[in-house]
Image (cartoon, coloured by chain):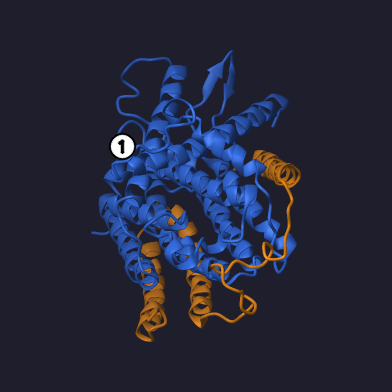
Chain colours: A blue, B orange
Amino acid sequence: MDFITLIDKSVLIVIIFAVSLVTAMYSTYGERKIAAFFQDRLGPTNAGPWGLLQPLADGGKLFMKEEIIPDQANKALFILGPSIAMLTACMTSAVIPWGKDLYFFDHNIVLQVADVNIGLLYVFGVVSLGVYGALIGGWASNNKFSLMGAIRAASQNISYELAMGLSIISIIMLTGSLSLRDIVEQQAGFNWNIWYQPLAFLIFFVCALAETNRAPFDLPECETELVGGYHTEYSSMKLGFYLFAEYINMFISAAVISALFFGGYNFPFMNSIGLSSNAIALLGVGFFFIKILFFIFLFMWVRWTIPRFRYDQLMKLGWEILIPLSIVNIIITGLVILIKEGSLF
Amino acid sequence: MQPTHIPIDYLPIFMQFIFAFGFVATTILATHFLGPKRAGKSKLEAFECGIESVGNARSPFSIKYFLTAILFVLFDIEVIFMYPWAVNFRELGLQGFVAMLIFISLLLVGFLYEIRRKALDWE
């Protein structure tokens, strides 16, 4: 890896970081506006035109707030919890392919931080580390509500991780690779995986809702029962990290869903409109972001439409419905591929 | 076969880690110095909806959560076994598929047992 590539990568890391932070910030604004629309209200209007500066005001407020660490809490772990949550949220974006390569004066820029052949496995690994954020923070607070929220979050995340892991096996069987770049490349044009794997998409989407602790799966912070769940005791930017990590995770989940099932940066007729390869690459990035924003909107739409589950219903859905369904999906996919290749009959 | 992926590919991930770590550490430190500090005895108590807090949160909780965690470990390892198989699915062909069917049915026997024993029922 030469020096220029390293500079490329550093710039790319900073850009992706900034983009995910800004998207997460404006998702909070979007969420409030969308909630307001669903409930026939106006939402934030005072800070800036149409309330557009609201996220900045919120961020600034969180920075200036008093930081409270309860007497009974375990101080080191109390700080470690939200840090882990934020750190893992920021790490997942490394393997996502944002677009085709750009060429400038026989130097090509790869719009992906790291194209490793275990891409998907890396995403799952980092996401499962995120459980520690909630668990450590909730336990360290030494508060009963936090503890309940934390263990709920942990059991919920690990349960849905199983169904999530199983649901994408059928995608891997189709593409024969774990690299997200390969998976996206195989969906060129309009040949998206969603046409072949609608069930896997459905399972994956439900699990993504549960993994990001979004309603109707927001049992860990269920405010009617648990005050604020695992972040009851948190204040200042440590609380901000937990909330922010949720929105970044939402952004990343939307990106992974678009990459796995909706062709990532591919768009229909991309090879027949006769543009230069750089233009197609940039258009692709645009389309990728449109897809991501659509899925973020879908996440919010679901949140403001469907009421929260009961905890036993949630566990039942994860273990007794989604896991068997995804196993059935794997078997059907296997059969169909074998029949198409003619090795079955 | 030539190894197409080498450890240096992971260097950017490490760079991103350093960057994210720096961001988190700076923010935590910055808020530590920026915010006001007015500590009080009742402010630093664990929050319990405004009533006097009772006892300590280091208390036992439902065994169900522990059971779920154990089952997760078992199943997750089995799921991980399926990844290499799925990547090589086309090369392994029918033989690999039958082998995986046997593996899945063994997994399902355990799964059924777990359901029948009501390990997943939360009353």
Percent x, y of residue A64: 66, 42
Residue that badge 1 annotates: A191
On what subunit does the disc labeled 1 rest? A
Q: Is residue A235 above or below residue A149?
A: above
Q: So how many labels did they put on this image?
A: 1
Specify the quadrant that holds the C terminus of chain A: bottom left
Label 1 crowd bin: few (<14), some (14–19), many (20+), radius 10 Å: some
Quarter of the image for residue A327 reads bottom left
**Three-letter amino acid code at disc 1?**
Asn
- What residue is at 56 percent from the left and 51 percent from the top? A122
Percent x, y of residue A49: 44, 25
Specify the quadrant that holds the N terminus of chain A: top right
Percent x, y of residue A135: 59, 64
**Mark 1 residue element:** loop
Percent x, y of residue A3: 73, 26
Q: Nearer the viewer, residue A105 or A149?
A: A149
Residue A73 in view here:
yes
- What residue is at 38 percent from the left and 15 percent from the top? A275
Q: Nearer the viewer, residue B89 or A277?
A: A277
Image side of residue A138 versus residue A321, left or right:
right
Residue B88 in view here:
no
Image side of residue A198 versus residue A115, left or right:
left
Name of the residue lying farthest toward the left: A345
- What residue is at 31 percent from the left and 53 percent from the top? A202
Q: Is residue A145 above or below residue A240?
A: below
- What residue is at 53 percent from the left and 53 percent from the top? A121
Quarter of the image for residue A2 reads top right
Name of the residue lying farthest toward the bottom: B117
